[in-house]
Image (cartoon, rainbow, N blue to C red):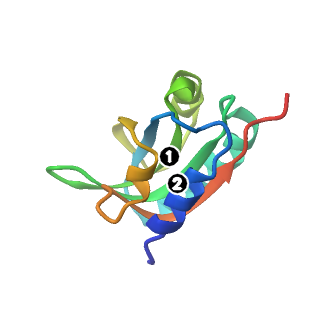
Amino acid sequence: MPDRRNELGACLNGMQGWGGLTVDLLVARLVDQDAARLAFDVLTASARQRVGARGAVVVYGNLRLPAEVLLVAGIICPVWDTKTNMLWLAEMSLEGLQKNGLLKVGDQSREQLGWPASPLTVYDFVAIDAPSQ
């Protein structure tokens, strides 16, 4: 699968209301590629109704940690919206979720997740604009 990290970086730079904010990556650890793709679709549909005040970017791909590489689906959101977004993410029923499967990679610069050296390899993403008030 192609890595869309560069496109993600451009997308994050263009998110309205995110200027100067750091972001959190909130992800679900999944058992296989099919589960990750399904979780991405479910999260995208849910995010359209439940995302925090500044919007979010739903992502799926691999997250490289020091001891392992995880298959993940989740969201990138400004730190100010993390609590709201973590609540709805924790309520989601995702098939193929590993035990203790939710993970937060916190307080990252927006640009860092789109760099070639990012720990997140991006297979797909969808930007969800802030809900209209």
Question: Image height check: is 70 above or below 123?
Answer: above
Q: Nearer the viewer, residue 108 or 101?
A: 108
Is residue 104 in view? no
Is residue 73 in view? yes
| Mark 1 neighbour density, 10 Å: few (under 14) some (14–19) many (20 or more) | many
Q: Nearer the viewer, residue 108 or 37?
A: 108
Quadrant location of the C terminus in the rendered image: top right
Q: In x, y percent, where is residue 78?
A: 53, 34
Quarter of the figure with residue 102:
top left
Disc sitting over residue 59 in the figure: 2
Residue visible at 68% across and 43% down in the picture: 16
The amino acid beneath tag 1 is Gly
Which numbered disc, 2 or 1, marks the residue that appears first in the sequence? Answer: 2
At numbered mark 1, what does the secondary structure look like: helix, strand or loop?
strand
Q: In x, y percent, where is residue 70?
A: 31, 54
Q: Residue furthest right?
A: 133
Residue visible at 53% across and 44% down in the picture: 75
Quarter of the figure with residue 131:
top right
